Image (spheres, rainbow, N blue to C red):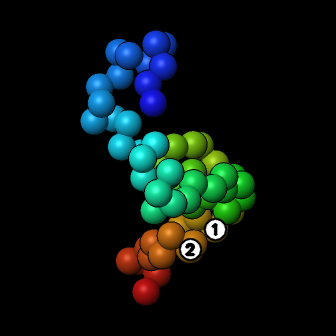
C-alpha cells in the first residue's frame, strides 16, 4: 500500500485512501462558477460574490 516515496507520510494520513477504496466518499471537481467557497479564497467581482453568497445561503442582515 505504501510506496517508498511516501514513507515519510504518517499512517494516519492514509485514511482518505481507505475511505475512497471502500466507496464511502466520492470526490468530484467543481467548476469555479459553481464553487461557492471561492468567495473565501479569491478576489471576485461583486456579481460573483453575490452569487456565491446566495448559493451558500449567506444573507446580509441589513437587507432583510
Q: Which residue sits at x=44%, y=19%? A: 6
Q: Secondary structure at mark 2?
A: helix
The residue beneath circle 2 is 54
User: Left of 15 or right of it: where is 46?
Assistant: right
Q: Residue 2, located in which quarter of the rendered image?
A: top left
- Position in image of residue 61 (x %, y %): 38, 77
Q: Residue 34, located in which quarter of the rendered image?
A: bottom right
Q: Would residue 42 be visible to someone looking at this image?
A: yes
Label 2 close to label 1 by CB (< 8 Å): yes
The residue beneath circle 1 is 51
Q: Nearer the viewer, residue 31 or 55?
A: 31
Q: Nearer the viewer, residue 17 or 63?
A: 17
Q: Nearer the viewer, residue 36 or 11?
A: 11
Q: Secondary structure at mark 1?
A: helix
Per the model, the C-alpha gap separating discs 2 and 1 is 5 Å
- Position in image of residue 36 (x %, y %): 57, 60
Amino acid at each position: 500500500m505504501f510506496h517508498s516515496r511516501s514513507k515519510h507520510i504518517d499512517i494516519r494520513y492514509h485514511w482518505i485512501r481507505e475511505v475512497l477504496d471502500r466507496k464511502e466518499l466520492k470526490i468530484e471537481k467543481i467548476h469555479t462558477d459553481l464553487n461557492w467557497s471561492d468567495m473565501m479564497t479569491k478576489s471576485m467581482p461583486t456579481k460573483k460574490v453575490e452569487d456565491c453568497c446566495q448559493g451558500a445561503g449567506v444573507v446580509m442582515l441589513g437587507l432583510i
